[in-house]
Image (cartoon, rainbow, N blue to C red):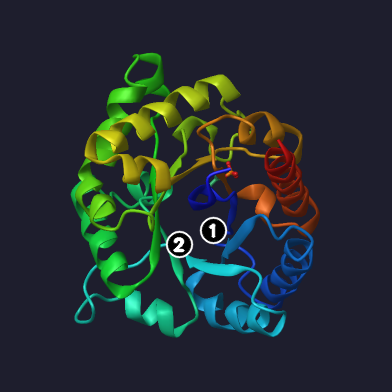
Amino acid sequence: MNPARRPLIAGNWKMNAGGADGCELAAGVSAVAGDYPEVDVLVGPPATALAAVSHQLKEAGDLVAVAAQNMHHEAKGAFTGEVSADMLKVAGASWVILGHSERRHIFGEDDAFIAKKMEAAFSAGLVPILCVGETLEQREAGETLSVVKAQVDASLAELAANAGVGVIAYEPVWAIGTGKVAKPEDAQEVHAAIRAQLAESSDELAQSTRILYGGSVKANNAEGLLSQEDIDGALVGGDSLKVESFGKIIEVAGKLAKQQQSE
Ligand code: PEP
């Protein structure tokens, strides 16, 4: 197994679990993560819960990292309602999810805006997870690979300048929160295309960038997805909100990693 591509299971809590429930969830995830040291695990609470969840996780042994779900690219200023990279770090986040399809489609974020955030995240020392993916209409029009390529291209310079740090999550929009998961071989095709695109920049970038799949990942479909050659982990929404379901996905990743290590 390539050590730069350790399996990564990330939970995106979206606008949920912002109180004591978030701390309880984090504690449960931490207990599971302790059983699977070959898997990197992170949780993404809402911004107001970052500090409490980070504190909880530190107390529990620092086994699970914390990701913010968004940030602004400027360091400070008149941006009502926004939060900067340094502010997220103060709250305990070391990762940030950027360009999630809900940010793109509900809040109108475009590739250029997301690329600015990628640059700001890297320079602040936060690890960004760049989310990309096509809509159902684009998939049906046969545009999946070109859409994803353009989304990755927009942040390629930032990823290349920080090879081995950034992560990409391929999340087909039609699979997010719908229960419709991509077929493993279809997801693999897109992941392989992304890796080939990274290789055009450098082999090091291609071999050191983790590419996660996201979109209705569940315990019962995780194995098929995570065993694909170019799928290095999962970004999980709905099923990251319960220790039981998220824990089972971590368990699947851990078992596959152990299998690969012994091969
Ligand atoms: C997500 O929000 O990134 C996501 C993949 O959600 P879900 O797992 O619920 O489809």
Q: Is residue 209 visible?
A: no
* Position in image of residue 67 (x %, y %): 50, 66
The count of marks equals 2
Badges 1 and 2: C-beta atoms under 8 Å apart?
Answer: yes
Q: Is mark 1 within 8 Å of ligand 1?
A: yes
Q: Is residue 177 visible?
A: yes
Left or right, 21 with respect to 67, comes to right
Q: Amino acid at mark 1?
A: Lys
Instruction: Read off the residue under disc 1.
Output: 14
Q: Residues within 10 Å of mark 1 (few under 14, many from 20)?
A: some
* Position in image of residue 236 (x %, y %): 60, 48
Q: Helix or strand or loop: what does disc 2 sit on?
A: loop
Q: Helix or strand or loop: what does disc 1 sit on?
A: loop
Q: Residue at x 35, y 14 (%)?
A: 142
Left or right, 103 with respect to 66, comes to left
Of pointers 1 and 2, the one earlier in the residue sequence: 1
Q: Residues within 10 Å of mark 2 (few under 14, many from 20)?
A: many
**Mark carried by residue 69:** 2
